[in-house]
Structure formats: structure tokens, C-alpha cells
Image (cartoon, grey):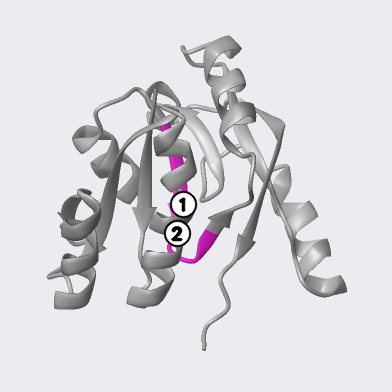
Amino acid sequence: MISALILPDGDPQALAATIAALVPGVAEGTIADAVVLVHGTPQPAIDAIADAAGATLVALAPGEAPWRAGARAARRDWLLLLAAGDVPLEGFSRPLERFAGTAPAVAPGALGRMRREEAGLLAGLLARLAAGARRPRAGDLVHVSHLAEGARPRVVRLAATLVREERA
């Protein structure tokens, strides 16, 4: 039902943590495929992780919009946008599936925004300010139509939470 688009930051362990966290969603049939988006030539470790997970690897051209490029490679119209290191907490599948099954699929519609567990007062305040932004970002569930230039979907808070995998 949903394709996961993952934008790595160069840390193979963060990418592996995100992909591993999606396994329950794959097992439940919510996550259909994954697309890993890299700027330029991928590091061998990133390439190996994507290959081992059966994910499609997309090398972005300079200046190319990553989410749009990922949408072209995705198998489904509903897209879960993630940054490497984003780890959906247990039980994330059901709220995503419910939202994708009931939200309007055509713009202007709605995008689902997962909650983020933030550490610290400043991080929490910044997260709340960014929560109102209507542009798709990591942690959102969007229909491909919401990635069009100028699309301004309304934001719906999902009953699913993301945490950041801490670097060693």
C-alpha cells in the first residue's frame, strides 16, 4: 500500500536502523517497497545495505528534488518520507494504513505527519514550529500528487511516532 522513501545522510548504520524498523510494516503488508535516495555516487556500504534489503537505489542528479525523484521509482502512490536514522516506533503501520485508506488522494488534500520524540526543550519547540509547515518533509505520509510544485496539503497529525537513531 505504501512505498518508503529514505534519504541517507552518509551514515550506513542510520540507514540500516531505518530499514530494519520498517520490517514489521512489510510483514503486515503496509510497506510495499523502499527507495533509497543518494546524492551522487553511493558509498559501497549504502549500496550494500539497499541491495540486501531489496530496496531500489536512486542516485540523485545535482539539484534534483529527492522526494520527487523517489516518487518516480516507487511502486505505490502513497509515500512514507524518511531520513536515515528515523525509526518508527512499534505499531506505526496501523495509523499509516488508516490514513492512506481514508485521506483524499488528490491535491489539495492532506498529508499525514508522524510525531517526533525530541530531546530537549529547544528541539521540542523547533519541532512544534515546523509541525505547521505544509511542505512534505521526512516523517510525512503523502500521496504522490502532494509533491507537485505549489501543492499545499493540510497537515494531519498521525498517531504514530518517530525517534532518531543515535549515532555511536
Q: Tell me if residue 43 can be seen.
A: yes
Q: Is residue 124 magenta?
A: no
Instruction: From the top left corner, tell me how far across and down residue 148 is, in percent.
Output: 38, 28
Instruction: From the top left corner, tell me how far across and down residue 16 is, in percent.
Output: 37, 66
Rendering quarter of residue 77: top left
Rendering quarter of residue 114: top right
- Magenta span of residues: 79-86
In the rendered structure, find residue 128 and report the number of the disc placed on it. Answer: none
Q: Amino acid at mark 1?
A: Leu
- Pointer 1 or 2: first along the chain: 2
Q: Quadrant of the N terminus?
A: top left
Q: Residue at x 41, y 27 (%)?
A: 29
Extreme residue toward the right, this view: 121
Q: Residue at x 52, y 47 (%)?
A: 137
| Residue 137 left/right relative to 20 | right
Asked if the residue at tag 2 contacts the one at tag 1, i.e. Cβ–Cβ closer than 8 Å, the answer is yes
Q: Residues within 10 Å of mark 2 (few under 14, many from 20)?
A: many
| Residue 64 left/right relative to 110 | left
Q: Is residue 85 magenta?
A: yes
- In whole angstroms, how far apart are the C-alphas of marks 1 and 2? 8 Å
* Residue that carries the numbered disc 1 in the rendered image: 82
- In this rendering, which labeled residue sits more in front, label 1 or label 2? 2
Q: Amino acid at mark 2?
A: Thr
* Residue that carries the numbered disc 2 in the rendered image: 18
Extreme residue toward the front, this view: 27
